[in-house]
Image (cartoon, rainbow, N blue to C red):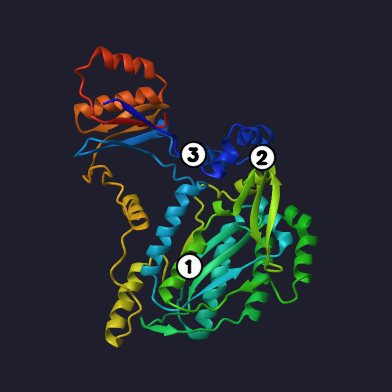
Amino acid sequence: MGLRKKKNMKKNILWQIFFDVKENWKRFVEKHEKRIRPIVRKEVEKFQQCGDPKQGFKLLVCEGCHDVKIVPYRCHSRFCTSCSSGEAEEWSRVLSHDAYQVLHRHVIFTIDEELRPIFAKHRYLLKDLMDRSVKLIQEFFQRKSKVMPGIIAGLHTFGGKAQFNPHVHMMVTMGGMTAKGEWKQYDFLPFEMLRKQWQTVVLKMLREKLSREEIKRIQPILQQAWNNHQNGFYIYAPKEKGNIKEQLRYIGRYLRHPAIGMSRIIAYDGETVSFRYKDKKDGQEKIETLSVEEFIGRLIQHIPDEFFKMIRHYGIYGRRIRSICRKILGKWQERVKRWIVKMNRLKRRNWSQRQKDQGGHDPGICRKCGNYYEYKGEVCLKDGKLVIRYTTDLMARKYLERMMGYQSGNAEKEEKGRKANPSAPQYSTLYLFGL
């Protein structure tokens, strides 16, 4: 049977804004090249190539009707909305199961608006911002109830309009583990006191970490930040209601959500971008319209530095002692018959399992005949060229070589070779993605 072509994967609106015929990203780089961090260019370029078979792919063949499916590699960029959305949902699902089944509070630590440019310039301060906000909560629990709480902190550097606005979101257990290995509940946070303490912590941190010359330059800003907030920097922690597991899942999704969701972008005309946002001052939904250049500039500033962890675990959720704490509290709950720890850990679903649960169809099953697709091999990029990484048989190798020819632009040469050797093994049904 002849070849059947399939259209390119449809690119989302964010991809179009960056890489359509206007070449907005290319023009942005040419204009601001010296100001763009290397990690930003790296992550955006990965996003550009996400799902492109020219970057590598896997070959799957139906064991019944021999239908062929090409699965391109994903980029896993920290800027790619397609890759991050599924991962964020899966992370929150696993978190809601593995976290202690107790009341958690969603606590948000903010800073003065005039201090934001300082953190944008000195991005290494962002880790200290997270660590010191967590330490403030930990010390309060230790003083008042002598317990170690569990805290998962996530750094957000964006506000509703995608401006640079660093603040820390926390998921905090209302209670913690005592020195005797027991669980003690504690459901009170004195926000008025914590706000003033948080203000002191942030301003003191800046004076400790920055150079004398820098402190001298920003001293008026620091003084104004102190004078403008008589009650301290704002801390927000709404009381959560309802099912504990759903609370955890909601907070987990909030910790991982991107700077701007695709559903919020409502218009792009090649020159400007319009998106929705919620104004925190009056609670109303409004529309912001920016030039493409300004929109790109706002988004890329939220790409974290390389190896920077945007989500960190502390206390009984800390990676080093998490397993030990679970075992200790597991023995305690068996003794008192109060179940707060699920001893069986939830396994992460792979892509096929997620697709099946969300859409009702297993992508590993052929829609035509109902048989399973078999893995036949894959092609990867090495030194800028596509090479066969693995194949199961000669037929798969021949097909992968032919696909590589199409992806590298040697389609005519490959087609002539096929006609010259008609006895070469072929699958009965072939179609190519991305042609």
Mark number for residue 250? Answer: 1
Of pointers 2 and 3, the one earlier in the residue sequence: 2
Q: Residue at x 64, y 59 (%)?
A: 277
245 is higher (above) or lower (below) than 210: below
Q: Of discs 1 and 3, which sits in the foreground?
A: 1
Asked whether residue 1 appears in the rendered view, the answer is: yes
Tell me if 294 is positioned left or right of 403 in this view: right
Q: Secondary structure at mark 2?
A: helix
- What is the quadrant of the C terminus in the image? top left
Residue 182, image x and y in percent?
37, 83
204 or 266: nearer the eye?
266
Q: CA distance from mark 1 to mark 2?
A: 36 Å
Q: Secondary structure at mark 3?
A: helix
**What residue is rendered at 37% in x and 63% in y?**
94
Q: CA distance from mark 2 to mark 3?
A: 19 Å
Q: Position of residue 412 (x, y in %)?
A: 37, 16
Marks 1 and 2, the one that precedes in the sequence: 2
Q: Is disc 3 surrounded by few (<14), some (14 to 19) or many (20+) residues within 10 Å? A: some
Residue 162 in view: no
Determine which quarter of the picture holds residue 324: bottom left
**Residue at the disc numbered 2:** 35
| Amino acid, disc 2 | Arg
Helix, strand, or loop for circle 1?
helix
Query: Where's residue 63, x and y in %?
Result: 19, 39
Which residue is the site of mark 3? 46
Mark 1 or 3 closer to N-term?
3
Q: CA distance from mark 1 to mark 3?
A: 29 Å
